Image (cartoon, grey):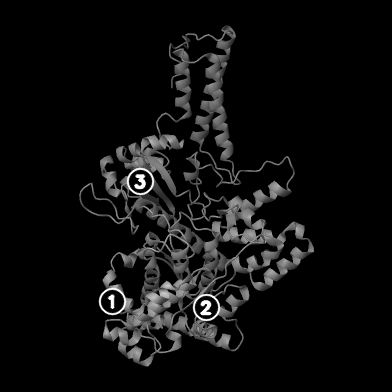
Amino acid sequence: MLLQTKALIRSGGSIAKYAAANPSCFVLQRRGLRRSFGPKYTAKINEAEAKWQARAGAIKEGKKQNTWDFFEERGYIKDTAGKKEHIAELMRTRRIGAYVGIDPTAPSLHVGHLLPLMPLFWMYMEGYKTFTLVGGSTAKIGDPTGRLKSRDQLSSSDATMNMTKIHYQLKKLWENVDTQMRARGYEADWARTRGIVNNNHWWNKQPMLEILRRVGHALRIGPMLSRDTVKNKMTQGDGVSFAEFTYPIMQGWDWFELFYQQGVQMQIGGSDQYGNIISGLEIVKAARESEPDPAERKYIVPKTSLDDCVGFTVPLLTDSSGAKFGKSAGNAIWLDPYQTSVFDFYGYFVRRSDQEVENLLKLFTFMPTSEIAETMEEHAKDPSQRVAQRTLAREVATLVHGEQEASAAEDQHRMMYTGPPQMTIPQAPRAKDAATGGDQYQTIPDKPVTLNNAPRIDMILPESLIMGKSIGRILYAAGLASSATEGHKLAASQGCYVGGAHRAGSDNVTMSPDLVSFMPVKLWFPGETQRYLINDNLLILRKGKHNVRVIQMVSDAEYALSGQSYPGQAFTGAVRKLNEIMKNLKENKLTPEQAKDAVNELQRSKQEKQQGQQIVFPEEKSRQKKDMEIKLKQEMDATIKTIDSMIGKNPSGRRVEVKKENKDGNDPYKW
């Protein structure tokens, strides 16, 4: 197997000798593995292999359940590409690789994506090699499966935005799976593998001619035209484009690349992906048999049935009303907390019916089957308490959003629906209106940024800021620094990063949108920022491991129409607004009554903002911020008192000239 091959190479052994002794090992020559490694690393690989063979023996003796049998018991299997007995034996004897592919055609994953990911997560816990593939290239074509109308073409900036956001969502899911695995008591396994791969890595350098030469002869037009997706789209839809027709070829080649590089023999797909999986099997087989290197071909061509690739699809879920699972009033339940709040996400699962909740517990949680049975017994005693639904909601929310966010949503839900009427419900930390901006991009003070508490990723900023201001001010506006000064220090110390595959050259050359890598930010002139833009309007910044911003640059007019503001934006602070009100009052542009209404509105908006920031774990304010708020309140109160006295002396409401000065002769309203 691949691990044994690594051990042989690293210990200085001969690939040919090992292959001759192990004809079932077909992934024998991986690119770049030509170094020798010490005996300690080899011993770790041998130990992992010995544990796996002991596990296989325990399954054969009936002491441990086969992972495939577990999948069938939980209801994960719909259609299989390969005989079930063969797949079960393959999963028993080999630490195979498996993957799930996701095209970033939307800015977020939704609940429907979780179902094919769950068996992949289970395989990871059991010690297999598991990968999630982000289809950066295939998303540009669009999977026509199940569609009568072609997808709208994604712009480069939208594709990069989606690709970046979904990459971090998958990263967040994998870290939460690790947390669940430790909580469930799974033993550490050095050979356990997980990874996120982007197919841009090979499609950006693989000539299409080479792919057609290797697999094109094995594909027949007749079977491809007979697929239901193609027939329905040609007879009932808008027809099939050549790009859509080649989509299964691209997906199949993705599988071959993962097989060749990582030994991935299994693909898991959604309920509509069976046709693409079958096509993928044919393409992988053709690519293996057409390997041009004779030395490598000798071992990559399958020798036994256990060398073949396999796959399966998960079932299509519908709720009790017949609607597709994962939809609410026709809208998808997104995994992005800024598109579907954690509170609404939790509530969606609490609303599941008694008829479907047990099946959902089996499909979407890591609870043992015995624990699910106990939960259902408790639920049956008093279904009105919805014990099973609340357990389901808590488990899924923990997987997607983390323990802290799930607990907060559970508390909010309990208080709202079971608490006393007078109880004040704290606002969910993710439930901010996207139009307000600001708070949703701020981190929690004195707490490390994790994938579960990271601020919102996507945002818009005006062109005048991106193209005309320093990188320090941009970092401040993006919420990655507490001030422009700190942003300047971050850039000077290279404490933050800019995303994109950098291209050297003139200012007219922009970053590549295909592969988002990061390099340290340096102090550059404002005019140089355009060299770091993707597709001329996208800037990706990162501070630390998880605090990321994907910034779309828009015109100043478009930003003004959005109603948003950013930290450091001119004429948006409360003090400046208060000074502007008093200036207009002195210049007789406002009556005292109008000025008072304006100050009251300013106070009300500030109070609403502070109330909106109230969360389950309140933010600790700095002493400086508290002093500033006290000073601002005193100034507002003094302003209203002055205006009230003016109204008393001028009951007619006429505009008056303000000439009041303090004992020092200075304007009391000017800071």
Q: Earlier in the sequence, mark 2 or mark 3?
A: 2
The answer to whether residue 305 is left or right of residue 28 is right
Rendered image: mark on residue 213: 1
Q: Nearer the viewer, mark 3 or mark 1?
A: 1
Q: Amino acid at mark 3?
A: Leu
Query: How many neighbours does mark 3 have within 10 angstroms: few (below 14), some (14-19), or many (20 or more)?
Result: many
| Distance between mark 2 and mark 3 Cα atoms | 52 Å
Rendered image: mark on residue 80: 2
Whether label 1 touches label 2, CB < 8 Å: no
Asked if one can make out residue 283 in the rendered structure from this viewpoint, the answer is: yes
Q: Quadrant of residue 39?
A: bottom left
Q: Amino acid at mark 2?
A: Thr
Whether label 2 touches label 3, CB < 8 Å: no
Q: Residue furthest bottom?
A: 21
Local SS, label 3: helix
The residue wearing badge 3 is: 490
Q: Position of residue 550 (x, y in %)?
A: 40, 49
Asked if one can make out residue 190 in the rendered structure from this viewpoint, the answer is: no
At x 61%, y 63%, the residue is 318
Quadrant occupied by the C terminus: top left
